[in-house]
Amino acid sequence: MNRYPAWKYLLVVFVVVIGLILAAPNLFLDDPSLQIAGGRTVQVNDGTLKRIETTLKSNKIEYKSAVIDDKGILIRFADEEVRARAKDAIKEILDPNYVVALNFARTTPDYLTSLGAEPMYMGLDLRGGLHFLIEIEMETAFQQQLDRYKNDIFDVFKSNKKKKLRARSMLIKNNTIELKYKTAEKRDEVLSIIRSKLTDLQFSTFERGDAFFILAEIKKQQVEEHRSNTITQIINVLKKRIDDKYHGLMEPVIVRQGDSRIVAQFPGVQDSKEIIDVMTAAASLEFRMEHTGYSIADAKAGKALGASIYKERGSGREVLLKNKLIITGQDITHATATSDENGQPAVSVTLNATGASIMKDNTRENLGKRMGVVFIETVKEIKQINGDNVPVKREIKEVISLATIQGLFSKKFQITGLSRAESTQLALLLRAGALAAPIEIVEERTVGPSMGKENIAKGINSVLIGFIIVVVFMLFWYKGFGLLANVALLVNLVLIVAVLSFFQATLTLPGIAGIVLTVGMAVDANVLIYERIREEVSIGNTPQASINSGYEKAFSTIMDANVTTLIAAIVLFVFGTGPIKGFATTLSIGIATSMFTAIVGTRAVINLLVGSKKLSKLSI
Amino acid sequence: MQLFKKTPTFDFVGKRKYAMLISSILFISAIVTLSVNWLNLGLDFRGGIEIELGYSQTAKVEEIRKALNNNGYKGAIVTEIGSTGQNVTIRISEKDNTSKVEVSNKVIDILKTKTDDEFKIRRREFVGAKVGEELREDGGIAMLIALAGILVYVMLRFEWRFALGAITALIHDVGITLGFFSFFKINFDLTVLAAILAVIGYSLNDTIVVYDRIRENFRKIRKGNTLQVTNTSLNQTLSRTLMTSVTTLFVLSAMFFLGGELIRPFAIALIIGVLVGTYSSIYVASSMVLALKIDRSHLMPVTKEDKADSHP
């Protein structure tokens, strides 16, 4: 009755062993370290390493080791103070295009790493992490907004073609749009039409020379709304990008600060360069039809109205595309990196409803014509101007594909013409959406434990002491079975840590809350079973029969209780962000592991030890 | 050791009128204090002021904290920043209508007069309240969907009366815990939010265990009316209910007494939640299903599926 087939015992042993291996790296504390990486213009090599080592030695800064790994140069130190001195010394001698980041390097022995075991991260509240202050280039955002309004005005002209409203010139100047007309009558006619159509703008008129002008400005309220929308949009995009890249296990705190800044904190983050890249990357797509009405030479002579020259990637061939945008990356709701039928890297995209209908109309109207996909990437470089290091930004627009529209398509299609790495990056950026305005990191800092180390030590100690009390209590209350429950509790903790480590999750205080709750529930499952066994014993069943029916009867209760809690945890994970997600992660993991240890684990031990013995009494 | 030598026979069900009264009073009080005081939201939720100071030697964080606490800035959070130990940030919650510049000037005045060490102001900044907005929204939506999910599951596994009962107990527990925080104006930050989420999990777990026994007994015990069966179920699960609460409270008490300032609000939230949750799983959850006129016939197995449930 109380016997398991051999595979069940083996399964338990297997899970426990794997758990121990995966959890073990957490016993090895990380070294404070510096990570030095190159950029687009500089490379890390043996020479760099040698220069750094010489500098450290001449400054009498002791370091544990300095090596080149796949991310650049990694230098380990004994403590954080030495590291801080080393950072200053190194920054002084290196080209500013190198990234020097404060990190914590793993000390996990190779035999564990080779098994794929790595420790879990500690959150900003437990250990510190990265802190960024990000400046949003609001000017650009407003400029883009003006561009959009300019297009709106164009649209008004187009839809009233017969009235011939088109201005002699339409320019964006000092946050205004200026429209020029020959006569006052025409201007007033135009004014009355666009005023009724574009309520976000306010208009004024003036005369200069013999021309009559309309001046359009964005209303103040709209400016404010646009500002706060821009910031919110950027925060959301950054969050999405990070969540996407790190699978939601990192818990960034990204908050608005003032009128044009964002604070981003990354608990326990190792690689600041990667995060900066993900956050600041500004690649997007534009879809434009080819303009066949002019030649390239016409365009160079400035004769091609409504068209611009683009370079084709790879061939460098020049192509003429219409200025009119079909859609942009903003209309893309989902994107994944895949391969096309020829095995070439591709990005498969899904458009939103508006984008899909525009694309459908466009492909219908332009069947047989060629459409260009423009890949826009912003590259940052540091240039020396008059002896100062000045960061310079350059926007690169390349046509990555120019293909004939063979048939109608709308919502879903593929884009080719990029490398594998670019496809992956572009898919991520498209998924998360483009930033509404360019951003720049104006401050980067490593944050010490936010509430002081002793507070953290106190917190963890108190949890440990609480555990010990529970362990003693269980032993006292349920005797032999209590001991078993305690073993299960410990194994459960090991398994939670193992799973968190495996997924490289960040452990934060809310995460610990999840663990505390799970430990409570892990004990609970055993309590449920034991109370049932006691009931069975008290109504006169034999010990073996009591064990069996105790486990069986408690099972559906444990199941229902855990499944309902799991539903709550999963919903919190899917819909929550940051700390809520962290809590939900540990809770879900804990539910799964505690059910395993309490139901299968303890049963296996009981079956193995006493399952085939004749018992007269149970130690419960 | 055993709590009860044999299954106790307390008359829980008979006392449910009083329990209803107590619960109603507590819950209504919670709603009143929440609507009057709302919650003492921490910096995480409402933003605030951040000042960074640079000292020429190691900053005395304790001293700075004490000076601010004794001079009108009780909630001031003083944090060491960077690896040298010479820089600190001071964060102060935003109070309505006070100018941020004024507050930061005041803080600096206090530190200049009440502490000895010289310092430089490295940075003065305002932390916006956006995150709170998002957190509240996301958290609120998540909780609603979670409640709906639980409702459906319990409805499928049990019966709609049980689902309603479980949700009522849940709202009861979370409401009263929030009310406690509101009434005593305890700092409500992200860790407390996590604790509230934990309370949901705990309360649910407790309630389901009791319901499970009620369902089982309805199917098993042929004699006795609804009230008696419910009461027997409560008594049978009583020692488990108390045991689990006691062990969880052990951990929480240790956190409360030894965990330090950071963890205390978190521990308080869970202690209140566990106490209320234990009480509600005995009184509220079962009273609700009784009030909804649960009957043996509602729980009789329709198919063989319940047989399959009881095998691991």
Image (cartoon, coloured by chain):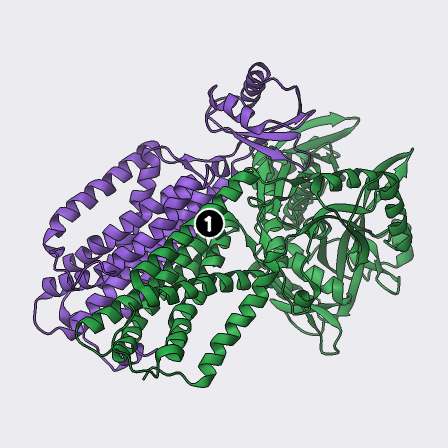
Chain colours: A green, B purple
Quarter where residue A111 is shown: bottom right
Q: Is residue A487 left or right of residue A70?
A: left
Image coordinates for residue B228, horizontal then vertical, percent: 10, 63
Q: How many marks?
A: 1
For the question of whether residue A372 can be seen, the reply is: no
- Amino acid type for the residue under numbered disc 1: Asp
For the question of whether residue B96 can be seen, the reply is: yes
What's the residue at 77%, 57% (across, down)?
A71
Closer to the camera in the image, B141 or A161: B141
A347 versus A469 height, above or below: below
Closer to the camera in the image, A45 or A459: A459
Quarter where residue A243 is shown: bottom right
Image coordinates for residue A146, horizontal then vertical, percent: 67, 40
Quarter where residue B117 is shown: top right
Closer to the camera in the image, A152 or A555: A555
A431 versus B117 height, above or below: below
Q: Is residue B300 left or right of residue A372?
A: left
Parent chain of label 1:
B
Q: Is residue B123 left or right of residue B292?
A: right
What's the residue at 78%, 60% (across, down)?
A70
Q: Quadrant of the N terminus of chain A?
A: bottom left
